[in-house]
Amino acid sequence: MGNLLETIYDVLFNPRAAMETIAQKKLTGQALVMFTVGMLVPVWAVYTGIKGAPALGSMFVLHFIGSLFFWVVGASVLNFVAELAGGHGTAVGLFAALGFSHLPRVAVIPLGVIAALLPDNLRGIAFGFIGLLVVIWTLSLSVAAIRGAHGLSGAKAVLVLLAPLLAMIGAIIAAVIFFGAALLEFPLHF
């Protein structure tokens, strides 16, 4: 996997092995290019479709900076959870592998063009199907990145990916229970 195009090919056709190699070699430069292309190309297509929007350039830059921030934070959190699950990789390796999990977002543009050419009654279904396909493909590449970077089984990699979401849901449930119990303890009087 010497250059970016070879790496992309490997991610497309042998994702687990490719993600393992990306993590081992810590291909952060290639990952940054792939992340940038994966984030900015679809966003650029959407923003250019909105003609005359004020502060379009600012929205574009803020979207990129926010996405980059969430990539770094997400990689850090997932690395911590993967280590708790018995993984033995590095944070930089997982960061690089997760950068390539944004590859499916580039497919939104050609698939969106095809969907836009469909009859009106099929267009919405096609756009929904494309969105679902891209989300599933991105999540499967994220699981492959966790597996490859930390040497975890598929089931553990899925749990690592879901752990932050499950923790947030648990925290929300606990807060609702706590708030509900507090309301029962101190009833409101009007």
Image: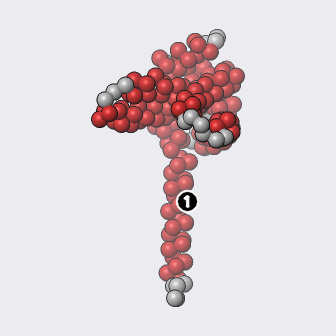
- What's the amino acid at mark 1? Ala
Specify whether residue 169 is in view: yes
- Front one among 142 and 90: 142
* Colouring chosen for the image of the structure: secondary structure
For residue 103, what is the image quadrant? top right
- The quarter of the rendered structure image containing the N terminus is top right
Q: How many labels does the image show?
A: 1
Q: In this view, does 31 lie above or below 65?
A: above
Q: In the rendered view, would you say 165 is above or below 64? A: below
Q: Residue at x 55, y 54 (%)?
A: 168
Name the residue rendered at 35%, 33% in the picture.
Answer: 123
* Image x and y of residue 31, in percent: 64, 25
The front one of 81 and 180 is 180
Answer yes or no: is residue 80 visible.
no
Residue 99 image point, x, y percent: 61, 29
Residue 90 in which image quadrant: top right
Q: x and y percent of residue 159 in the render? A: 50, 42
Tell me the residue at 51%/56% (across/down). Answer: 169
Q: Residue beneath label 1, please?
A: 171
- Provide the secondary structure element on which disc 1 rests: helix
- Residue furthest to the bottom in view is 189
Q: Please tell me which residue is depicted at 59% across the width and 37% down the height of the picture.
A: 52
Label 1: few (<14), some (14–19) or many (≥20) C-alpha neighbours in 10 Å:
few
Between 40 and 22, the residue placed more toward the observer is: 40
Residue 36 x %, y %? 64, 27
Q: Nearer the viewer, residue 102 or 14?
A: 102
Q: Is residue 113 left or right of residue 22?
A: left
**Which residue in the rendered view is the most extreme toward the front?**
52
